[in-house]
Image (cartoon, rainbow, N blue to C red):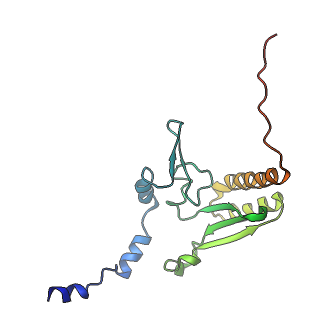
Amino acid sequence: FFLAKLKHVDRRPERSQLRAMANVSPDLIWGCVKNTSAFLRKGRFPGVSFSTEPGNLTNMASFKASGLANKKTIDIVQLEGGKLQLTTNVTDFEGTMRKPARMKRTTVLSKNMTAVAKTLTAVTADTFYRADLKRAAIAKACALKMSVKRKASGSKAKPPRKKWEWK
């Protein structure tokens, strides 16, 4: 009798519980994640924590830049061949809650840096989608483009300058 009861118990949450979990406050998520995230990297510098989470443009462990706590995130990843991939969350579509594959919108950026900067401005500031991250997005895209140029030309970084000495 006891085993028969256990066999029919459904341990999945109700749909109303799923909706409630999707509407958790970003502040609450940040409070849970800020010191215990697997993406945290604490290094040699006291008081400074870095984060490698997806959606974090500045790689700083802060609420503003967090890709886990914020609903609207921007991520730029380098693809092969020097192309960049821009990923944003879709927040205006109601049916994406149960379809995670449709929650992300990706765009491949393969043009020159001026066109990439215009695209990033159009995606962030012009559409009111995290306008505060516009400068960080352009800076990260520029750094990724420059790293491809350095690898292609075979040149190394500039050597450090010699210290000026009194004679």
Between 70 and 68, the one nearer to me in the picture: 68
Question: Where 60 falls versus 6 (above or below)?
Answer: above
Q: Quadrant of the C terminus?
A: top right
Report x, y in % for residue 104: 60, 72
At a point 44% along the width and 55% down the height, the residue shown is: 33
At a point 46% along the width and 60% down the height, the residue shown is: 26
Report x, y in % for residue 6: 22, 84
Question: Where 79 falls versus 56 (above or below)?
Answer: below
At a point 72% along the width and 64% down the height, the residue shown is: 79
Kindly indicate the quadrant of the structure image that contains residue 8.
bottom left
- Of all residues shown, which one is farthest toward the top? 167
Q: Quadrant of the N terminus?
A: bottom left
Question: Where 32 falls versus 45 (above or below)?
Answer: below
* Left or right: 130, with 15 as reference point: right
Kindly indicate the quadrant of the structure image that contains residue 123.
bottom right
Instruction: Count the marks.
Output: 0
* Left or right: 167, with 6 as reference point: right
At a point 64% along the width and 72% down the height, the residue shown is: 105
Between 134 and 56, the one nearer to me in the picture: 56
Between 79 and 151, the one nearer to me in the picture: 151
Report x, y in % for residue 148: 78, 55
Report x, y in % for residue 18: 40, 76
- Of all residues shown, which one is farthest toward the left? 1
- Of all residues shown, which one is farthest toward the front? 154
